[in-house]
Image (cartoon, helix red, strand yellow):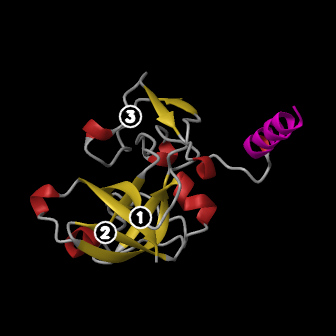
Amino acid sequence: MRNLSLGAFLLVFLLFSPNSSEARHHVCKPSGKVKGKKPSPDHCNEDDSICCIKGRYYTTYKCSPPVSGSTKAILNLNGFEKGGDGYKPSKCDNKYHSDDTPVVALSTGWYNGGWRCLNNITISANGRNVEAMVVDECDSSMGCDADHDYLPPCDNNIVSASKAVWKALGVPLEDWGELDITWSDA
């Protein structure tokens, strides 16, 4: 009976320990939803088809899957230049970046409050590797408002990359958009 009580105590301790995190247990559950709003005509500088839809609910996350030596993710295409997708300067350094420079934004959990800011990650896909600097957050905890250019929240497994990353991975231009990748801290 004593071993069972000790086992039960250890299980409860591990599950509810302040040092325990969702990521450590490979769990990343949605944190909520945001309701889409109709953007004003001067917002949503993207193709209107990817803007939030008024009345639709979008899932939000404050976490991302755990990072390993080969973390699975979705690479998407993003612009970091002024006037493009980069509707605001990058969060890490308050600057715009050339799309000819290998830079990325990470989902909220991986961005981790800026912990990876201005550090490189290694992205692997298409039989190639490329190092890219983390300069921004792809916000998965909020969206559908003016601060986010009326775009939905990012999924929790996104590495949003400049054209330079796509070129370095040797992805044909007609295939740019979304790509299954792995990544790790460099």
State if disc 2 and disc 1 touch (CB < 8 Å).
yes
Q: Name the residue under label 3.
A: 52
Q: Name the residue under label 2.
A: 124
> Whole-Å distance between the Cαs marked 1 and 3?
32 Å
- The one nearer the camera, 12 or 36, is 12
Q: What stretch is highlighted in magenta?
A: 1-15
Q: Which of marks 1 and 3 is in front?
A: 1
Which quadrant holds residue 5? top right
Magenta stretch prevailing secondary structure: helix
Q: Does the magenta stretch include residue 8?
A: yes
Instruction: In the rendered structure, find residue 103 and report the number of the disc placed on it.
Output: none
Specify which label sits upstream in the sequence, 1 or 2.
1
What residue type is disc 3 on?
Cys
Camera sees residue 83: no
Is 168 located above or below residue 171 in the figure? below
> Whole-Å distance between the Cαs marked 2 and 3?
31 Å
Q: Which of marks 2 and 3 is in front?
A: 2
- Horizontal side, residue 6 vs residue 50: left or right: right
- Outermost residue toward the top in this view: 55
- Density class for disc 2 (Cα within 10 Å; few <14, some 14-19, many ≥20) is some
